[in-house]
Image (cartoon, helix red, strand yellow):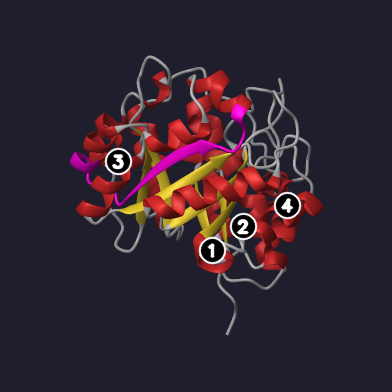
Amino acid sequence: MTEHVKIVEVGPRDGLQNEKQFVGTAVKIDLVNRLASAGFANVEAAAFVSPKWVPQMADGTDVMTGITRRPGTIYSVLVPNMRGFEAALAAHADEVVIFGAASEAFSQRNINCSIAESIERFEPVAAAAKQAGLRLRGSISCSLGCPYQGETPVSAVVDVAERFLRLGCDEIDVADTIGVGTAAQVQRVLKAVGQVTDLGTRVSGHFHDTYGQALANILAALECGVRIFHSSVAGLGGCPYAKGATGNVATEDVLYLMNGQGLDTGIELDAVVDIGQWISQEIGRATSSRAGRALALKKQA
């Protein structure tokens, strides 16, 4: 049997949240629906965060209530607190995503508290999610590097992973938030995380492509046994700490890689290429996906 890899599509949330121009609710709904139809088993669809801080995500309830649910698809939402969780529950989210940094400097500079304090704040959210029967995912930002303190200690990533496991997280994202990681570093971190949880079923790789290393890092993670990865159609998303840099690795590029490795994702690459071209036109900028551009041009030839 062909080995299966799960691709979590994060474009509608992690990708679009960085767009300065507001993307219409109808476009967001259409994007989520198109992605689900292409075969994604998990789509990160919205965030229930303060519209003051992330105005792009202010319509999360409308998006979640407007989408056409595809049976078997997990629709995830990011929540920072109990208020966000209650909105996610009311909107019938399948999975809530909580987050904590592996960098003390990042945690202090962004939310004015320590890593330990930030994760303690999620205890009621985690308990409520479990009580409601929802999936719970914990995302570890700055797992490979921090814009303030440089390389992140491996022990810090393991510490946050253990804290998330104690909260009851079903899945843990090792996230290279600013895209500075390299393949050898990825393997050091993942091998250490693999000492406290199963890499094949409980850990996902979330790589940004700021330095062009995302696909190499995904290959390195595959070699370690990771079988869940995040990506963003058309490479949606920016990197606020590296001006002009691309953000999330493009889904089309990841799918092209997985197909070449003989791995099954259950996702139609051609359909995702079309979605990437469509959403790029909707937001008025070119796709960041190299495979997406090449395959789109090949279709036109």
Number of residues whose C-alpha sits closer than 10 Å to that of mark 1, classed few (under 14), some (14–19) or many (20 or more): some
Chain-order first, disc 1 or disc 3 = 3
Q: Nearer the viewer, mark 4 or mark 2?
A: 2
| Quadrant of res 59 | top left
- The residue where tag 3 is placed is 125
Horizontal side, residue 216 vs residue 35: left or right: right
Callout 2, which amino acid?
Answer: Val
Mark 1 element type: loop
Measure the C-alpha gap from mark 3 to mark 2: 23 Å
- The residue where tag 4 is placed is 186
Mark 4 element type: helix
Residue 226, horizontal then vertical, whole percent: 61, 63
Say whether marks 1 and 2 touch (CB < 8 Å): yes
Residue 252, horizontal then vertical, whole percent: 63, 51
Callout 4, which amino acid?
Answer: Val
Measure the C-alpha gap from mark 3 to mark 4: 29 Å
Q: In terms of depth relative to the viewer, which is nearer, 253 or 249? A: 249
Which residues are the magenta region? Answer: 89-104
Say whether marks 3 and 4 touch (CB < 8 Å): no
Q: Is residue 285 magenta?
A: no
- The residue where tag 2 is placed is 193
Please give the label number shown on residue 197: 1
Q: Nearer the viewer, mark 3 or mark 4?
A: 3
